[in-house]
C-alpha cells in the first residue's frame, strides 16, 4: 500500500496510520524531557573538563572519569538521534531543525571538554597503566579500549593541539556542507517530457526512475538535464572538491599519517593492503565486468550502448512488487537461516514501532537505520511497493539487528560498530532475500528479472563503488602532491575510469559523462565508499557459508554481529572464517557475478 494524497502528492503525517510510524517516545516522551537531558549534558561539561590531569592518580579515579565521559556521551547520543529523527519525519518544522543544530553544536562542546583525555592517557607509561588496572579490576573491561587509544600514540597531539583540532570540527565539514546545500536546496533541473509526453519537472527521484525507463528518449533527455545542471557550476564544484581534499590532507599531515588513505583507515585499524587489494583484484578481473556491459548491449539491442542505458532492466516484463505487509512476511521467511531468535526479534521490531514506513509531506527522502545504545534501532523508509523497497527494508533490518545484537551483548564502550562491519550485516540480509526469491520462484521471466537485479546490485555496490574508490584515491594523491583539482582534470580522470570499468561496449558522452563526479556526495565522506565493496565481498562469503552450513556457521556469523567494536573490524570478520586481507573474498564476488551472467545466458538460449 502506497500512501498518497490528491494528485499523487504525499499526505500529511497525521493522515498515516500509527502502525506505520516509528515510536520515538521510546527515546524521550516529549521535548521537555529532551530539554532536560540537553541541560544535564551542558551541566556536565565543567566537571569533564576539570578532570584533566587526574588520570594517573588512581585506578578508581581513572574508572570514574571514563564512566563520567561515557555517561555524558550516552545521553548526548539519545538527544542527537531524537532531534535528528524528529526533524527527518517532517523537515518543514523549523523548531526541530533548530534543535538538531543545537545538539550538533553541543556535540562539539562535549568533544572540546574531553579532548584532553586521549593525550593524557597516552602519557601514562605502560607499567603505570598496568598498576592502575591492578588497583581497579573493573578497568580490565577497557583493555581493547586502551589498546585502541595507545595504537594512536604517534597520531595523537598534545592536549592543547587536540583541543584546537576538536574546535575545528565544524569548519572541517565546510566543503561537505556547501555541496549538500547546493545539491539538496539550490540545484534546479530543466523539465523533461515523460513517457506520456507530459512536461514534468525533473527531480532526483524522477531521474533515477527515468534512467530505468524503457523509453530511451526519456533516459537521454533526463541524463542531459541532470548532468547539465551540475555542469553549469562545474568549476565551483571543482573548487569545493579541491577544498575538501585539502582539508583531508591537512588533518592527515597534522596527525602525522603517511597519507590521507592511511589516516582514513586508521580509526578502524584497516590495513591499507585491504584497500589496494580491492582495486587490484577488480582490475585484474575487469573483463568480467565487460562481459556484463556486452550482455546489456546484446539484450537491449542498442548500438551504441550509452551511459544512460546502463540502469535499464534487461527483463522488465518479469518485474514484480510487494506491499509492505507482504514484504515483511516474505522477509521473515528469508531470514530463517539465521535462526528463530533472530526472526522473532525482527518480527517484534516490525510490530513494536521500529519502522517509519510511508512517505509524508516534508519527510526526508531515502532510507536509513538509526538508534544508539540506549534506544531501540529505528528505520526510516519511503515505501512505494517497489522491489527495491523490499531490499531496502532487508538492508536496514540488517543494520538494526546488528545494533540490537551488539547492544545486548556488549557494554557501552563496545556497543557500536564501524561501517566496515556494518555494511556486512545489511548486505548479508539482501543476499538471503535474493537467494530465497530465486529458490521459491519458477517463472522464467521473473527469474531473469531477479538475475538481472542481482547483477545490477553487485555492479552498483561492488564495481561502481570500487571505481569511486579509485577515483577518490587518485584525487587525494594529487592533493598530497600539492596539485589543484580543476573541473577539467577531474573530468579527464573520471572519463578514464568510466572507460576502464565499463569497457568497449559502452560509448560515453564526451561532454556530460566526465561531469558525473560532480553529483556524488560520497566523495566528501573521506574514503567511505570502498567499504561497500569490501563489505559485499565479506557478506557473499559469509552468506554462502551460512546457507550451505550448519548451526556452527550461523553462530559464527552471529558472533560477528554480537561483537560490536570489541575487536578491530578485520579481526571481527575473521570470526566467520573470512580473511579480508586476502583477495579471496573479492574473487568470490567476481566468480558469483560471472556465474549469474552464465545463468542469464543459459536462460536466454
Image (spheres, grey):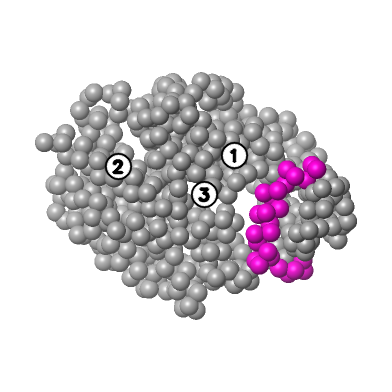
Residue 374, percent across and down? 69, 35
Q: Which numbered dot is residue 570?
A: 3
Q: Report crowding for label 1: few under 14, some 14 to 19, many 20 or more residues within 10 A (C-alpha).
A: many
Indicate the quadrant containing the C terminus: top left, top right, bottom left or bottom right: top left
Q: Which residue is drawn at 15% across and 36% down?
A: 602
Element at label 2: helix
Q: Residue under label 2, please give it.
A: 592
> Could you tell whether 450 is left or right of 423 in the image?
left
Q: In this view, does 175 lie above or below 343?
A: below
- Does label 3 or label 1 sit earlier along the sequence? 1
- Does label 2 or label 1 sit earlier along the sequence? 1
Q: Is residue 346 above or below residue 34?
A: above
Query: Residue 239: within the magenta?
Result: no
Q: How far, Cα to Cα, is label 3 from label 1?
A: 12 Å
> Could you tell whether 29 is left or right of 522 in the image?
right
Q: Which residue is drawn at 41% across and 50% down?
A: 533
Element at label 1: loop
Amino acid at each position: 500500500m502506497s500512501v498518497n494524497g490528491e494528485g499523487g502528492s504525499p499526505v500529511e503525517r497525521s493522515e498515516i496510520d500509527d502502525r506505520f510510524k516509528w515510536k520515538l517516545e521510546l527515546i524521550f516522551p516529549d521535548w521537555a524531557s529532551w530539554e532536560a537531558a540537553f541541560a544535564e549534558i551542558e551541566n556536565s561539561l565543567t566537571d569533564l573538563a576539570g578532570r584533566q590531569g587526574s588520570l594517573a592518580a588512581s585506578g578508581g579515579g581513572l574508572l570514574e572519569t571514563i564512566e563520567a565521559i561515557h555517561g555524558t556521551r550516552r545521553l548526548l547520543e539519545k538527544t542527537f538521534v531524537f532531534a535528528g529523527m524528529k526533524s527527518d519525519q517532517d523537515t518543514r518544522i523549523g523548531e526541530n531543525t533548530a534543535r538538531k543544530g543545537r545538539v550538533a553544536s553541543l556535540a562539539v562542546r562535549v568533544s572540546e571538554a574531553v579532548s584532553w583525555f586521549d593525550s593524557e592517557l597516552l602519557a601514562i607509561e605502560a607499567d603505570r597503566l598496568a598498576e592502575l588496572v591492578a588497583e581497579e579490576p573493573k578497568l580490565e573491561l577497557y583493555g581493547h579500549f586502551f589498546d585502541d587509544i595507545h595504537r594512536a600514540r604517534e597520531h595523537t597531539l598534545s592536549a592543547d593541539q587536540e583541543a584546537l583540532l576538536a574546535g575545528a570540527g565544524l569548519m572541517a565539514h565546510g566543503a561537505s556542507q556547501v555541496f549538500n546545500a547546493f545539491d539538496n536546496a539550490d540545484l534546479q533541473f530543466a523539465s523533461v517530457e515523460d513517457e506520456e509526453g507530459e512536461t514534468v519537472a525533473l527531480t532526483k527521484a524522477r531521474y533515477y526512475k527515468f534512467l530505468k525507463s524503457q523509453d530511451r528518449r526519456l533516459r537521454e533527455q533526463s541524463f542531459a538535464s541532470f548532468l547539465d545542471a551540475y555542469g553549469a557550476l562545474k568549476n565551483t564544484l571543482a573548487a569545493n572538491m579541491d577544498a575538501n581534499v585539502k582539508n583531508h590532507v591537512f588533518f592527515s599531515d597534522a596527525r602525522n599519517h603517511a597519507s590521507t588513505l592511511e589516516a582514513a583507515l586508521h580509526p578502524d585499524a584497516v590495513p591499507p593492503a585491504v584497500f589496494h587489494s580491492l582495486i587490484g583484484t577488480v582490475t585484474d578481473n575487469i573483463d568480467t565486468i565487460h562481459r556484463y556491459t556486452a550482455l546489456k548491449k546484446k539484450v537491449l539491442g542498442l548500438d551504441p550502448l550509452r551511459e544512460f542505458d546502463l540502469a535499464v532492466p534487461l527483463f522488465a516484463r518479469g518485474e514484480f512488487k510487494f506491499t509492505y505487509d507482504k514484504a515483511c512476511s516474505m522477509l521473515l521467511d528469508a531470514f530463517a537461516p539465521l535462526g528463530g531468535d533472530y526472526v522473532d526479534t525482527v518480527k517484534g521490531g516490525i510490530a513494536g514501532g521500529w519502522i517509519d514506513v510511508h512517505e509524508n509531506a516534508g519527510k526526508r527522502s531515502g532510507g536509513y537505520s538509526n538508534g544508539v545504545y540506549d534506544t531501540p534501532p529505528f528505520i526510516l523508509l519511503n515505501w512505494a511497493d517497489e522491489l527495491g523497497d523490499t531490499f531496502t527494508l532487508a538492508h536496514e533490518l540488517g543494520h538494526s539487528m546488528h545494533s540490537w545484537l551488539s547492544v545486548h551483548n556488549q557494554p557501552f564502550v563496545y556497543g557500536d560498530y564501524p561501517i566496515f562491519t556494518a555494511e556486512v550485516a545489511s548486505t548479508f540480509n539482501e543476499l538471503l532475500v535474493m537467494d530465497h526469491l530465486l529458490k521459491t520462484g519458477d517463472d522464467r521471466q521473473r527469474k531473469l528479472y531477479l538475475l538481472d537485479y542481482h547483477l545490477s546490485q553487485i555492479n552498483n555496490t561492488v564495481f561502481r563503488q570500487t571505481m569511486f574508490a579509485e577515483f577518490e584515491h587518485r584525487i587525494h594523491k594529487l592533493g598530497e602532491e600539492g596539485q589543484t583539482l580543476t573541473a577539467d582534470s577531474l573530468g579527464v580522470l573520471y572519463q578514464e575510469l568510466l572507460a576502464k570499468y565499463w569497457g568497449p561496449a559502452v560509448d560515453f558522452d564526451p561532454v556530460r559523462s566526465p561531469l558525473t563526479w560532480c553529483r556524488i556526495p560520497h566523495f566528501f565522506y573521506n574514503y567511505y565508499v570502498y567499504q561497500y565493496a569490501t563489505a559485499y565481498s565479506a557478506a557473499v562469503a559469509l552468506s554462502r557459508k551460512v546457507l550451505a552450513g550448519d548451526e556452527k556457521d550461523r553462530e559464527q556469523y552471529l558472533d560477528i554481529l554480537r561483537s560490536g567494536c570489541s575487536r578491530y573490524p578485520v579481526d571481527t570478520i575473521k570470526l566467520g572464517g573470512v580473511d579480508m586481507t586476502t583477495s579471496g573474498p573479492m574473487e568470490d564476488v567476481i566468480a558469483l557475478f560471472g556465474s549469474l551472467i552464465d545463468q542469464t545466458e543459459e536462460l536466454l538460449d
